[in-house]
Structures are given as structure tokens and as C-alpha cells.
Amino acid sequence: MAKSMRERYETARERIKNDEDVSGEESRLMLEFLDANDPRRNTYQMPDGKTKSDGTLARYARALCRVARHLEPDLTEATAYDINALMDDYLNGNVEEIKDEGLASSSVRNFQGPTRRFYLYHEELRVDREDIHFADQDESPVDERDIFSTEDVQALREEAKRRGSRDACLVDLLLYTGQRRSAILNLRLKDVKPEDGIFYLNEDDGDLKGANGKRPLLGANKAVRD
């Protein structure tokens, strides 16, 4: 059975606690930061008062643990210069665990964002989050060869129908709503209201990248009803 987003987050927390390359003080600071972003915990609070979904918390935990393993000096003594230098090494493939050609800018931004937020919370560490630079956005031109034709879409829907109403429902939800795969897979029965033509995003378990609220079912309504 696939793990829920909460289970993945708890696993990532345990990894922080057990990583031999992460000091005890770094581990404590990271866990306190995660608690401050966790709506299920009220001991600590972020300066901006915002909390994050389980999927985002899991991503933060994994990213910070990796940064802590690679950063010299460690999170408690590093400067913004040290952090930016590590991010440059990620971009250029100068870290042992990173492929020779380096990481894409979008991947490096996934480390920079959580690190900036970590220092927003831990202002006593005297790293100005604004001094931690974001890598330039990758250009992602659309290749027409990657786009389904009308015939492709119809063939996909017909094959899904042949496999049963559940597959047909999932395919139509993906096609018509444009939601992320994890958002669709984590929908609960109570989240879907075909009689009203809407569904609610599951903010407890979906990796929603900040999305929330209700969305129209559009052309998926019939498949959902079936």
C-alpha cells in the first residue's frame, strides 16, 4: 500500500534524526523549523504565521537534510556566501552525490527555497534569507511532439473505459481538470461533488504546491458519476 503524504513526511523527519552526517544541533533546529510549519503542531510558529501541507513538509525535510550533509561549515555557522557556493556546486556537479553535469536550476531552487525559509525562522543564526540567491528559472519550451493529439486523447479515454469506470474516471479527471497526479490520487469520496459539478482538493494528503479550495469537474463530471 502506498504511503500517505503524512507517512512520507514522518519518514523524512526520522531520516534527519538518524543521518550520521547531520549534527545533533542541526537536527534539533531543522525539526523545530518543521514543527513551526506543521499545522498539526502548535509549539512553534513561523514569523509569517503560515503553515505547509504534508507534501511540502516532506520536501522541506528531504531538502534541508541534504543541504546539511553537504554544507561546510554547518547550518549553525554557515554564511549566505557558503550557502550560495554550495548551490553553485549543485548547479555545476561539484558535489559527490550529484551527477557530473549538475542539477537543473529548477532542482536547485528546491533546495534554496526551504533553506531561505529555514533562516527566516532561525533569525538567531544571522543569515539574511534575502542574501540566499535563487537560481534562474529554467526555460521550458513546449515541444509539439510531446502534446497529445485529439486522436491520442480519444484513444486514451477509450482504453481507460475498456478497463473499467474507475480508470475512466481517473483519466478524465487528469485530462479535464489539469491537476497534479498526486492531487487526483489523494482525493477522498467526500471531496468529490458531482451533483454540484465540483471537487475539493485534499489539503491533508495531496502534494498541492500551495493550491487549495474547490475546482470544477468540467468534462470529467460524467465519468465521476459513473
Image: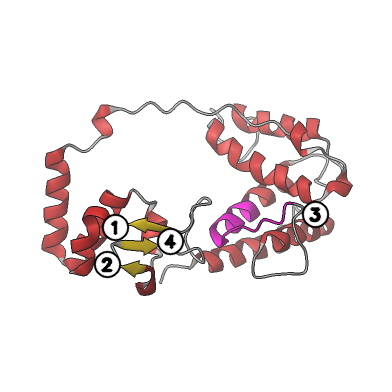
Q: Is residue 1 visible?
A: yes
Q: Which mark is residue 26?
A: 3
Looking at the image, is mark 2 or mark 1 earlier in the sequence?
A: 2
Type of the residue with mark 3: Glu
Disc 2 + disc 1, Cβ < 8 Å? yes
Left or right, 187 with respect to 145, comes to right
Q: CA distance from mark 2 to mark 1?
A: 7 Å
Name the mark nearer the viewer: 1 or 3: 1
Region rendered in magenta:
48-62
Look at mark 2 in the image and give the residue it sits on. 194
> How many residues crowd mark 3 within 10 Å: few (<14), some (14–19), many (20+)?
some
Type of the residue with mark 2: Pro
**Under tag 1, what secondary structure?**
loop
Name the mark nearer the viewer: 2 or 3: 2
Q: Position of residue 30 (x, y in %)?
A: 75, 56
Q: CA distance from mark 2 to mark 3?
A: 48 Å
Q: CA distance from mark 4 to mark 2?
A: 14 Å
Look at mark 1 in the image and give the residue it sits on. 217
The image quadrant where one finds the C terminus is: bottom left
Type of the residue with mark 1: Leu
Look at mark 4 in the image and give the residue it sits on. 201
Residue shown at the point (24%, 29%) measured from the top left = 145
Looking at the image, is mark 4 or mark 2 earlier in the sequence?
A: 2
Q: CA distance from mark 4 to mark 3?
A: 34 Å
Q: Is residue 164 above or below residue 74?
A: below
Name the mark nearer the viewer: 4 or 3: 4
Q: Which mark is residue 148?
A: none
Residue 183 occupies quadrant: bottom left
Residue shown at the point (33%, 61%) measured from the top left = 198
**Under tag 4, what secondary structure?**
loop
